[in-house]
Amino acid sequence: MPAATLSRDQVVDRILAAFRRYGYEGSSLSRLSEATGLGRSSLYHYFPNGKEDMASAAMAAVGAWFTQHVLSTLDSREASAIRLQRFAGKLTEYYANGMAPCLMDVFTIGEAGSLFQQHLGGRMRALMALLAGVAEEAGVDKVEAAVRAENAVVAIQGSLIVSRALDSNGPFLRMIENFPAILLGPQPAK
Amino acid sequence: MPAATLSRDQVVDRILAAFRRYGYEGSSLSRLSEATGLGRSSLYHYFPNGKEDMASAAMAAVGAWFTQHVLSTLDSREASAIRLQRFAGKLTEYYANGMAPCLMDVFTIGEAGSLFQQHLGGRMRALMALLAGVAEEAGVDKVEAAVRAENAVVAIQGSLIVSRALDSNGPFLRMIENFPAILLGPQPAK
DNA sequence: GTCTATACGAAGATAGAC
DNA sequence: GTCTATCTTCGTATAGAC
């Protein structure tokens, strides 16, 4: 019933959603077919190398979305705290308030790990570098900024897992609220 | 070739290792058979309900190991900081210096999520309660102790993911070093 | 581009001999 | 308890018609 004419981008978005939800091995072609409304043959038309191509496309799509909507929030002339707040807001959107898994987590498990580890590592490093940059601009020492950027991505990923395990988005939302302080604070005192 | 006579516990340990490494869907019976050195029939002899039974056994095994070796470190009359340091040491062991995934992460993905979410939630809550208790004993306010316990498990889980994504255990080891401070510190200042 | 059909192996599971 | 054999369904992939 998703029927009719989905653009390729829309197809990839649905594939991405399936991978995030079911993982790489858990996303069978049947599920991907169902998720996109496309028959197997159509899927192979778009992605000649099958599942691996679909996963690559999903990675590329999430990369583009992140760059456009999330990372771009860090690139303005406003105060660091404001930018980080906007950044956190976009994270909240992307992670569906903390209940949607991160592809960087899901794809480090199982076969996908070996297939995409390098790519994932690059993404993670790039994100950390950007966040460290924001902290530095706010006057944080270079070394300390790198530490805090690492703490920030650790907090994002960890809060997603804990939220899923508890089936409650509390941990994620608390992380989001505290997010600017992770990078800028000398300690929010809470 | 692992051949001969593995005890049931040893069998379960190998099954657990496979699940942590390949995830639930990624751990096919073939892989589990190979990992244990047992044929399919033998696996079904030990685990009549197949893969789901194996996963339950793995969860139970990791629970027992954690209780015996990790959680027990929190239960002494020594200073909180000392206990947390020992706790962190055991975590390091369990997570193989940060390079072995956590079952709580892996089993929140895909089908395993629906099968074991409740169990996982209970474990996560129990762990947080214990850690919060240690912080309280050290004089941290009850509400703040709960927040810090949550931050602690978030840091554990997040650092594992970031370490895997970067293919470097740096993030995990830094988290371990800082672990007591997460619960006790008014801020380690770095 | 999408459909139907089909191939083929893998996955999960069971039966029965030993 | 383990082995061989078997069964069924599923997963991945391709061929060829429309």
Image (cartoon, coloured by chain):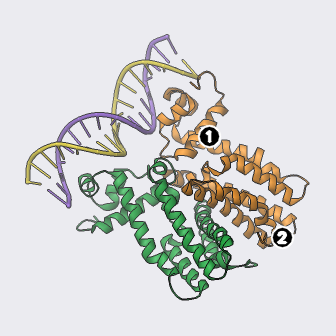
Chain colours: A orange, B green, C yellow, D purple
Quadrant housing residue B149: bottom right
Q: Which image quarter is the C terminus of chain A in?
A: bottom right
Vertical side of C8 occupied by C12: above or below: below
How many numbered discs, if any? 2
> Which of the numbered marks, if any, corresponds to residue A142?
none
B82 or C16, nearer to the observer: B82
SS category of the residue bearing label 2: loop
Residue A57 is tagged as: 1
Residue B68, by quadrant, is: bottom left
Circle 1 chain: A
- Tell me the crowding category of disc 2: few under 14, some 14 to 19, or many 20 or more residues within 10 angstroms, Cα based: some
Q: Label 2 marks which chain's residue?
A: A
Left/right placement of residue A186 relative to residue A13 reads: right
Residue D12 lies left or right of residue B189; in this view the side is left
Residue B152: name its quadrant.
Answer: bottom right
Check disc 1 and give the amino acid type.
Ala
Q: Is residue A181 above or below residue A15?
A: below
Instruction: Report the front residue among A104 and B189.
Output: B189
x, y percent for residue A138: 87, 65
Q: Residue at x 62, y 32 (%)?
A: A11
Instruction: Name the residue rendered at 32%, 61% in the picture.
Output: B36
Instruction: From this view, report whether residue D18 is shown above or below residue B123.
Output: above
Q: Quick one: label 1 or label 2, which is nearer the N terminus?
A: 1
Task: Characterize the local packing of mark 1: few (<14), some (14-19) or many (20 or more) Cα atoms within 10 angstroms.
Answer: some
Q: Position of residue B33 (x, y in %)?
A: 31, 56
Residue ID for mark 2: A140
